[in-house]
Amino acid sequence: MATTIDTPGGITARRRRGALGLLAWLCGIVFFLPVAWMVLTSLHSEPDAATNPPSIGAPLTLQGYREFFGASTGVSPWPPLINSFSASLMSTLLVLVLSIPAAYALSIKPVRKWSDAMFFFLSTKMLPAVAGLLPIYLIAQNTGLLDNVALLVILYTSMNLPIAVWMMRSFLAEVPVEILEAASIDGAGLPTVLARIVAPVVAPGIAATSLICFIFSWNELLFARVLTGVVAGTAPVFLTGFVTSQGLFLAKVCAAAVCISLPVLIAGFAAQDKLVQGLSLGAVK
């Protein structure tokens, strides 16, 4: 019967892998602790949530969630949630429609000075959002788009488009050129190539880009806070409404934060395989 002898190098490698695994677990716990604390606080009553130090073993209650859904005020959170979902979903679809052909032109069919075009896309993210707030507000006021979900769709599309182009270009660079050449020989046009050949090949990248754009749109607060009011208010704006002149109600705010974060968490959990596969696809050439 053969026996294996551990060499010093093998022992050192195993120890290194064990240390890296332990470090990864510690980092995961550190990042998860605030989320767990938020969920636990949302299940406490306001007096227990406001104690210092916090009362971990306090009785659990769903009063914070009942308050979020308007048990005492009668204010429903569904219109802001629907506005956020509509603006995020529509802007994400528009971003994909615009970014995939642009990334195709910059990767598979590269144009002249494509690197300058990519830098231009990136440079649009260098401007602080608050610097463009006043011009956007005046334009929206003059065009009658204030407090309108359509304005948020346009803004979120323009904000996420540079990131999507950068991501999709790295994904499309992995598409074998031979497949595209075979499709062109068969007489397939550009729309057919994009829809039936490119899209299935880079489906993980499309899923990753869609999820990131959706998260960025869902979490956006500055423009939604200034450019919307009663009709088109989004979920983050609704969340800030829990901070009143009467004080900060921690249990209610944490319950609202948990409910508003759930759609993003569910989408991320459902698409986690595609997300990891897509990010890995774009990172390796």
Image (spheres, grey):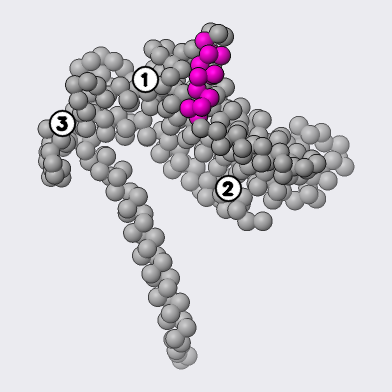
Numbered disc 3: secondary structure: helix
Picture coordinates of residue 151, whole percent (x, y):
53, 18
Which residue is at 61% across, 39% downward? 122
Where is 263 relative to 178, above or below? above
| Magenta stretch: includes residue 138 | yes
Mark toward the start of the polypeptide (2 vs 3): 3
Q: CA distance from mark 2 to mark 3?
A: 43 Å
The x and y percentages for residue 265 are 40, 39
Left or right of 252, for residue 116: right
- Image-quadrant location for residue 228: top left
Residue 58 visible in rendering: yes
Q: Amino acid at mark 3?
A: Glu
Q: Which residues are magenta?
A: 129-141
**Badge 1 is on which residue?**
78
Most common secondary structure along the magenta stretch: helix
Residue that mark 2 sits on: 278
* Residue 88 visible (yes or no): no
**Quadrant (top left, top right, bottom left, bottom right) of the C terminus:** bottom right
Q: Amino acid at mark 1?
A: Trp
Q: Which mark is residue 243?
A: none
| Label disc, if present, on residue 46 of the rendered structure | 3
Q: Is residue 30 above or below residue 20?
A: above
Amino acid type, callout 2: Gly
Q: Residues within 10 Å of mark 1 (few under 14, many from 20)?
A: few
Q: Secondary structure at mark 2?
A: helix
In the image, residue 241 above or below residue 230: below
- Expressed as whole percent of the image width and height from the top left, the position of residue 183 reads 82, 42
